[in-house]
Image: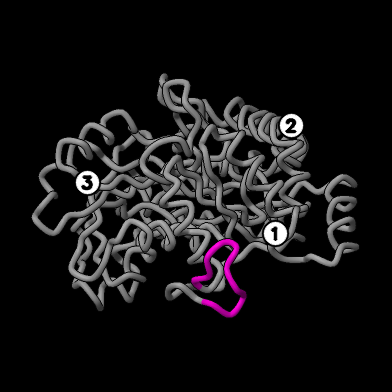
Amino acid sequence: MQVPLSCPDITHLELKYVAEALSTPQLSLGPKLVEFEAKMARYVGTRYAVAVNSGTSGLHLVIRALGIKAGDEVITTPFSFIASANCILFEGARPAFVDIEPLSLNLDVGLIEERINPATRAILAVDIFGHPAEWKRLEEIARKHDLRLIEDSCEALGAEYQGRKAGSFGEAAVFGFYPNKQMTTGEGGVVVTDSEEIALLCRSLRNQGREDGGEWLAHRRLGFSYRMSDINCALGIAQMERIEELLAKRERAAEMYSERLKDIEGIRIPCTSPQVKRSWFVYVVILAEGYSRLDRDRILHGLRQRGIGCSNYFPPIHLQPFYVEMFGYRRGDLPLAEHVAERTIALPFSSKMEEKQVDYVVDNLKAVLG
């Protein structure tokens, strides 16, 4: 059996909406963009949504819109997809990494204040693997120290923290819609915010610095080509109309894994805080203390040999080669993130997972562990 690491969930509805978009004269900056942004803002509960061509682009625009620049530092996590730190580098600022919590794997808020210095301008927290960070405490710290607060919710559409939807915290948040996410636009992302200033600036920046309603060849500021096409928006509209179905199917897949894996010696299944509703982006297990990184890599190889897609989500950002070259990070600088990263296994996961696939993955994981 071949079981892919991820798989988008596309139906005739998506095909219909995309075909309709293709039959119109406006394939960019058209009515599908307006409709998609309105659906996203309404779902999250924010006043504004600004669609872009990737979550990475969205994070970059938020950093730029908040005025973060060279010489500034932004406190963030080393355990994430690399874009959550790279977006800070894009503006010449520096990521200031803080280690993670052992259970949620999110930024350890108890370590933040000791990392704050005169150069600190913002906190960028990630809702890792669809599990919201400690937003109440993050907001308290940001207010106390007069810091900007950014939510990277690229992996957490549909999640909730204390009854509030992910994406509704901080001054702005970003979702990503790569094909392995809870929903997809093929490629794409969105900035959500209650700030009219941030929304207008992000709309201008994504469109080569043009102002809304201005001349096409008049550029108010330096901008980027970060637009999401109406074709991608049409796909996103269809997925948003199915979002509760998609989230429920992913939750069911996670439940099937957890039920089968909970008693297996040598691994830890994902845990969710009581005040959180997780939105399942991936299903990542962590090997027990006795396993090394070489053991984990051997297990990944064994699973792949059996046709099972899997990965090591995530290598620590600060130990990526160019971060080591730029900033001189060394192994041991952020010990918990490093220790966890050496023992993670992302198993195949999507809203299309079938019970027989889960059984096949679990049976083979047991065999490879043995």
Name the residue at 26% across, 30% down. Answer: 137
How much space separates mark 3 and mark 2, taking CA atoms? 37 Å
Give SS at disc 2: helix
Give SS at disc 1: loop
- Residue topped by disc 2: 245
Q: Closer to us: mark 3 or mark 1?
A: 3
Amino acid type of the residue that numbered disc 2 sits on in the rendered structure: Glu
Residue 112 left/right relative to 356: left
Q: Is residue 319 above or below residue 32?
A: below
* Position of residue 254 measured from the top left corner of the image (x, y, whole percent): 61, 32
How much space separates mark 1 and mark 2, taking CA atoms? 19 Å
Please state which of residues 310 and 237 is positioned toward the viewer in this rendering: 237
Mark nearer the N terminus (3 vs 1): 3
Name the residue at 31% across, 55% down. Answer: 78
Q: Is residue 156 above or below residue 174?
A: above
Quadrant assignment, res 213: bottom right
- Residue topped by disc 1: 186
* Position of residue 68 measured from the top left corner of the image (x, y, whole percent): 28, 61
The residue stretch that appears in magenta: 209-218
Give the main secondary structure, helix, strand or loop, of the magenta stretch: loop
Tell me whether circle 3 and circle 1 mark residues in contact (CB < 8 Å).
no
Q: Is residue 273 above or below residue 241?
A: above
How much space separates mark 3 and mark 1, taking CA atoms? 34 Å
